Amino acid sequence: MAKAPREVRFGIVSTAMIATKVCGGMHQAKGATPAAVASRKLAKAKAWAKKHKVPRAFGSYEEMLDDPDIDAVYIALPPSMHHEWTIKAAEHGKHVLCEKPLAMNHAQAVEMADACRQHNVQLMDGVFWVHHARAHHLRKTLDTGILGKTRRVTSAFTFCWDKVPKDNIRVRPELGGGSVGDLGWYCVRITHFVYRQLPKRVFATARYFNDVDFNLSATLWYPDEKMASFDCGFDTVMRQWFEIAGSKNTLVCEDFVLPLSDKEASYYSHDGSGKKGKRFTIKNCVQQTAMVEDFAKIVLSGKLDPKWTEESLATQKVVDAIARSARTETIVELE
Ligand SMILES: NC(=O)c1ccc[n+]([C@@H]2O[C@H](COP(=O)([O-])OP(=O)(O)OC[C@H]3O[C@@H](n4cnc5c(N)ncnc54)[C@H](OP(=O)(O)O)[C@@H]3O)[C@@H](O)[C@H]2O)c1
């Protein structure tokens, strides 16, 4: 790994909608700064840089990668471009914070991870919620054994378009559209967060629009009689909840992907008879800032953290199996 800088200078790859939020996180985060933005058009990059108080603008992604004053990139491109630009960034010695879904498939994700390892740079996907203080609190609560024997993780992440915007990257198969990569990614991640292992097999059904899964429902079977299920899609109102149920208690969170407030985020327990138990509340956390800080800490420490890459690879493997199951209408076994 190259000599650690004092502050991680991020180059933002594209003027994507989500880059606005993450750039805000970079402004707020300790140990990081948004140093530049690159767009396919220089005028667009310049206008975006001005609006979001980013000091430098580039008219091509490549040009920004060539710049020695950029330590890391945040890749906010459509999923079909994550593989190419992660590998290019790694070859230029830049650390990579790459949006989800990490890749178009697991084979691509492995190549991205290999390239980053080979060039000694960090790879992390852009899932915010795992960096929220609520996720750390949840981990501790789970580790107390409150659930008894964990049986099920059930989750949903959906939103509803009244009219499908046909040029949106989510409904364009050539750009990596589809609800399981866009939304189901988070549901798979909460399941992996709880079980910390891969399912043995999965089954999914989907409704397709323009050759992308527009909505999808999945069932996952794990060792030790544990199960999970989720649904995701672009045709049902905003839902972003999980329930983790065991033999003694359940834990429920109603806004796990996008907390309704930065000031206060909570989840709660239900006891064995189904009565609401305790509410756990976490104050003052902006999750995209927390993500940038976690990433920057790794870069500044000079020591890569393989945990994040492994979690992305595991998520990608499960998402691939689910997508394959839905396409083939068969149960898919994972090795
Ligand atoms: N972590 C989260 O909470 C979260 C939330 C939303 C989205 N995301 C992820 O972030 C990524 C971007 O999503 P988004 O909705 O923000 O995307 P978006 O607004 O559609 O922006 C994508 C950007 O990619 C660049 N681009 C390059 N080639 C393109 C092409 N052929 N077609 C379209 N755009 C192209 C464009 O930037 P230039 O014109 O500037 O080059 C464009 O602005 C996706 O992977 C998505 O899943 C994550």
Image (cartoon, grey):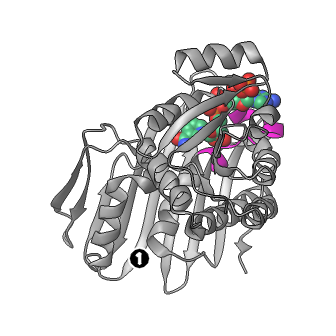
Looking at the image, which is closer to me, 147 or 111? 111
| Residue behind mark 1 | 151
Compared with 119, 43 (above or below) is above
As drawn, the residue found furthest toward the bottom would be 224
Instruction: Locate the C terminus and report the quarter of the image it occupies.
Output: bottom right
Is 168 covered by the magenta stretch?
yes
Coordinates of residue 63 in the picture (x, y in percent): 80, 32
Which residue is pictured at 45% across the width and 42% down the height? 288
Compared with 289, 325 (above or below) is below
Instruction: Locate the N terminus and report the quarter of the image it occupies.
Output: bottom right
Left or right position of 232 against 111 = left
Q: How many marks?
A: 1
Left or right position of 101 against 24 = right
Indicate the amino acid at tag 1.
Arg
**Res. 41 image quadrant:** top right
Coordinates of residue 235 in the picture (x, y in percent): 57, 35
Bounds of the magenta segment: 167-182
